[in-house]
Amino acid sequence: MEKAKNILNINNIARAVICLALILVIVVIVLICTRPRGGDGSATGDEYRSVVVVASGDTLSKLLTDQGFSNAQVLEIAKVLKSDANITSLRADSDKIEFVRDAADAPVSKIVIIPSPWRQVEITCNPDGAWVCQTVDITPDKRVVYRGGEILDGDSFYLAGARAGIPDGILAEVYDLLAFEMDFERDVRAGQKFSVLFEENYADGKKVDNGRVLAVQFEALRGNVKMYRFKTADGKTGYYDENGNGAIKSLKRTPINNAKVTSSFSTSRKHPVLGYTRAHKGVDFRASTGTPIPSAGAGRVVARGYNSGHGNYIKIRHNASYETLYAHMSRFAKGVVVGTTVKQGQTIGYVGSTGLSTGPHLHYEIIKDGKHVNPMTVKLPAISNLGKADKEKFLEYRKTLDSGIEQLSKHPDWFIQL
């Protein structure tokens, strides 16, 4: 046997490289000679497939005609797509169409329209000659990932979250969740840590989009805020704290995300316009004119109008105890009038500077049992808590999530396969 130190000498390496190059040349020649012809088509088993990405100006009629379909067949296929799959048009640079043939020169036997990575519509011709279609839902490859970060001096939560690698959409959802518990203007300080556990959806080994937020943690001034996503036995999904109590409150402390507090709740404040001291019964959030104002909770509009102090304002009754008021609006949202039922987060108006105001902002009040309370400190009721049976299952599920968080926090480049 040749010694190891002599195996990798220069002559041996040169001969090996030449042999490898000859083998690669032979492989390439074989592939070229045996490659199926037909542009972007490919042979799979006994079928020949070609994929067309819809381009600007393409229509279903044009694409089908290019594949040899008659006008009558085009009309029939279009009718089937509209009635059975609710597809009436194609989107350029987004939708794909796959044409399947038994051979490269055979007529199309199946059409596959791919409007999204998670859905495709298959159109085939049955033995009677009629075109039929069925929708196929594609299950994504779900991977759970962890992202954690820390607030630095001068940071906003958005800036710190982006630096931690949290995608914009996930970050916005986390902000909405934490807004039920936190005032982002006052509760965010340097040194606070946070983490998010969320899903990423993959198809064919490539990330397509982000999924659901599974868990959120934030070291807030009032204590460590934790929220976990959980589905109850009756199929309802919500977010709960570590003890199984509802984490989603009936009202949000800050209706407009990422808005700066310019004036706090106070029993004695010098009014910037009137010049004398009087109670400031709400919180002011600075925002540019035209910024949408979402309802802090679900309820019914009980007042909408104008007065010299509030300017354009809306009052919403949420239940027997709570009402909210939004003032200085530039205008009201279309269709929002007295008696209108609104959902939490629904736009009810737009920021302005009407009434006694020195600049565009939202004046926001919470009234509890007829008395004004501080939106930043009042204890808000949860929408729902878990029952006994669901709580037991939740606590076990929470342990599983906590275990995953612990492992991923040590190895942030890992993921958990669902």
Image: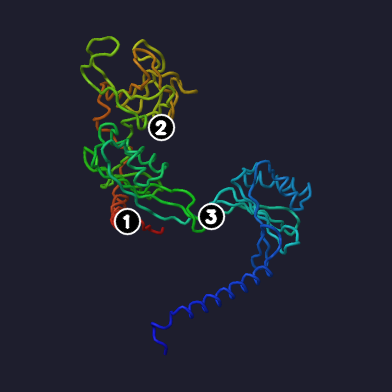
Question: What amino acid type is highlighted by mark number 3?
Answer: Ile
Residue 254 x, y percent position in the rendering: 33, 30
Location of the N terminus (image quadrant): bottom left
Question: What amino acid type is highlighted by mark number 1?
Answer: Leu
Numbered mark located on residue 325 in the image:
none
The answer to the question of whether label 1 and label 3 lie on touching residues, with beta carbons closer than 8 A, is no
Classify mark 2: helix, strand or loop. loop
Q: Is residue 104 left or right of residue 7?
A: right
Model colouring: rainbow
Residue 260 x, y percent position in the rendering: 32, 28
Select label 1 or label 2 by which is in front: 1
| Viewer-proximal residue among 63 and 238 | 63
Mark 1 burial class by Cα count in 10 Å: few <14, some 14-19, many 20+:
many
Badge 1 or badge 2: first in the primary sequence:
2
Quadrant of res 82: top right
Residue 202 x, y percent position in the rendering: 48, 55
| Viewer-proximal residue among 139 and 161 | 161
**Residue at far front of view:** 10
Question: What amino acid type is highlighted by mark number 2?
Answer: Gly
Select label 1 or label 3 by which is in front: 1
Label 3 sits on residue: 138
Numbered mark located on residue 345 in the image:
2
Work out how far the residue at label 1 is from the one at label 2, CA to CA, in angstroms.
33 Å
Quadrant of res 368: top left
Location of the C terminus (image quadrant): bottom left
Numbered mark located on residue 408 in the image:
1
Residue at 43 percent of width and 23 percent of height: 350
Badge 2 or badge 3: first in the primary sequence:
3
Residue at 32 percent of width and 56 percent of height: 408
